[in-house]
Amino acid sequence: MKKQFIFICTVYIFLFVSGSIFAVEERTISLGAGAAWRSAEIKKGISEVSNVRPHSVLMLSSAPAASIAGYSAATGLLGNFTALSESALDMSVSFDESDSVLFRDSTGHYRLTVPPNVEAAGRASARAGNGAALFGRSANSGSLVIQPQSRNSLFAPGNRIGDFTIEFWLYPQNMENGEQIFSWVSSKPSNGNYTMQRISCSAFRNRLQWSFVNFFASPREAASHINIEFSGLSPVIPKKWSHHLIRFDASAGLLEYIVDGASEAIAYATSTSRENSEVYMPIAGSDGSFLLGERFSGLIDELKVHRACIGRSSIQKYNPAGGRIETRAVDLGENASSVVRINVRGGRTGAINNHTRNEFRENGRFRFSDDSEMSFFVRAGENPYSLINSRWESFTPGQDIRDINGRYVQIAVDFYPSADGEVSPYLDELRIVFLPGGPPLPPGNLNAVAVDGAVMLRWRHSPAANTSGYLVYYSSVRGELFGSDALLGPSPIDVGIANSFLIEGLKNGTLYYFRVAAYDSLAEGRNRNIGEFSAEVTARPLAGLSP
């Protein structure tokens, strides 16, 4: 019975002590998931996507690399071609609009006429951005027409075109012979008559076949033309995206066809059909139009025309430089709050082992076998406007965080795609787990030693990280603690961050009562945030006593 009593007392003391130390309970603030991502104040190369998880997630934008990071230079024979710049962009049709009647050229150089059978496909079907053009679902297989509406357009009537590049993404449903993917049709005067000028891209034996008729004219005799025809080497696979690019270098007369970044065909628009010969230059005919998707079933995305012979374009779905988000300053509600950990839910999505699938995980390092990853950073402070001056600290989701304190917390996440650019990590939810701030805990082991006309106090520092100093209370009357005998003035006395103090000017023979309280780092002037008192101690100064 005696042992049981001792055990109960021991447990009671433990619970009393631990309860006083850990009385503050953890709290949680969620960002993302059901709360959406309004908290993501800054997004660079990041989009909010709704078809990956039950709630919207953040992931890399699938906008084409041309609009994000430009083009990388080609090497070897093709190394002298111009890199892309915004000024070189002549046409850009992204098909990102929610309705096909809203399809447009963002440069304003061309106008689009969209037939009823051409539909807008959503983000889930697109190669890049928010949508693509869907052809062939209706029996009426009319083509989408794109016409120059400005003299500044590269293909305006009579223009000598010079360097140019045409590129687009293609997703054929069947890739049947005779499907017309892309063409340019106009008329040109010739010996008093008009002849048809045509660029044609059509399907033949699962490859794209290109022909240029009456497009390249002799610099000496405009009526003299050279016609060029070639096809790609690699088959275009149905129900799979592929990137197609035609470019012309006017200085050499070199016409090149590139599929998925690899050169498939080269021809020379010269008098001898070889290099180092007289170059035949492109001249745009009258009443010209681009025709898109005639007798074609499938998707086309990101059609672009450049007034330059550009270096190889990046065909990765996601920008290799990645993207970043920064949340707003999240208010934890109390000064001197402490971030305990940040839990994260997310994963990766994209073409994994040739199949589109999602992988989900919670916490840990979001680093995947294909080199896609997310990196996480946090900073905190008492003023949301001064966070910009604070240093970002990296953290591992789900693991304890130390020394991140303040009322306002900001989180940043860097996103990086897989090595092949086809997979993006995604962020589903951030959960900030924190201890709300409050007055610091009292110091421990307060001890008082009397000397002649004074008392020496010593104590153990408060365990609270936000402790900035201590107040010493004294009195000759039990329970009051507001004496006035000390040389430094009435109780309490601010002794700063010290853990010992000699109170001088006390009366010998008088019993004094002492307590010490800690205050936090914001305890300046009237804003002092004072914690609980320590245990009370007593001492009586006497003449002749020495330390």
Image: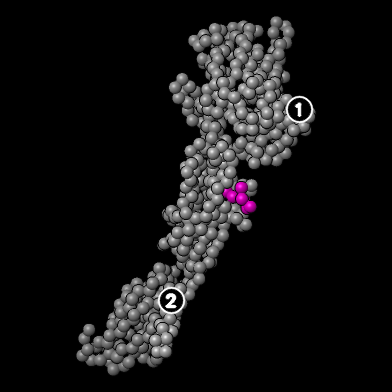
Residue placed at 47% from the left, 54% from the top?
Answer: 364
| Furthest-bottom residue in this view | 509
Question: Crowding at label 2, few (<14), some or many (≥20) Cα neighbours within 10 Å?
Answer: few
**Front one among 382 and 70:** 70
**Residue 57 among those drawn in magenta:** yes
Residue 478 versus residue 436 in the image, above or below: below
* Res. 125 image quadrant: top right
Q: What residue is pinned by disc 2?
A: 18
- Tell me the quadrant of the picture where the N terminus can be found: bottom left
Which amino acid does the dot numbered 1 rest on?
Ser
- The kind of secondary structure element at disc 1 is loop
**Front one among 43 and 237:** 237
Which amino acid does the dot numbered 2 rest on?
Ser
Q: Where does the magenta region start and end?
A: 52-61
Q: Which one is earlier in the sequence, the residue at label 2 or at label 1?
A: 2
Residue 76 located left or right of residue 28: left
Find residue 297 and report its horizontal and vertical position in percent.
70, 29
Check residue 282 in the rendering and tell me which mark sits there, or answer none: none
Find residue 278 and report its horizontal and vertical position in percent.
54, 9
Which secondary structure dominates the residues rendered in magenta?
Answer: loop
- The kind of secondary structure element at disc 2 is helix
Q: What residue is pinned by disc 1?
A: 141
**Front one among 65 and 427:** 427
Please say whether residue 143 is visible from this viewpoint.
yes
Residue 436 versus residue 210 in the image, above or below: below
Residue 188 versus residue 327 in the image, above or below: above
Residue placed at 52% from the left, 22% from the top?
Answer: 263
Marks 2/1: CA–CA distance: 77 Å
User: Are the residues flagged by discs 2 and 1 in contact, CB closer than 8 Å?
Assistant: no
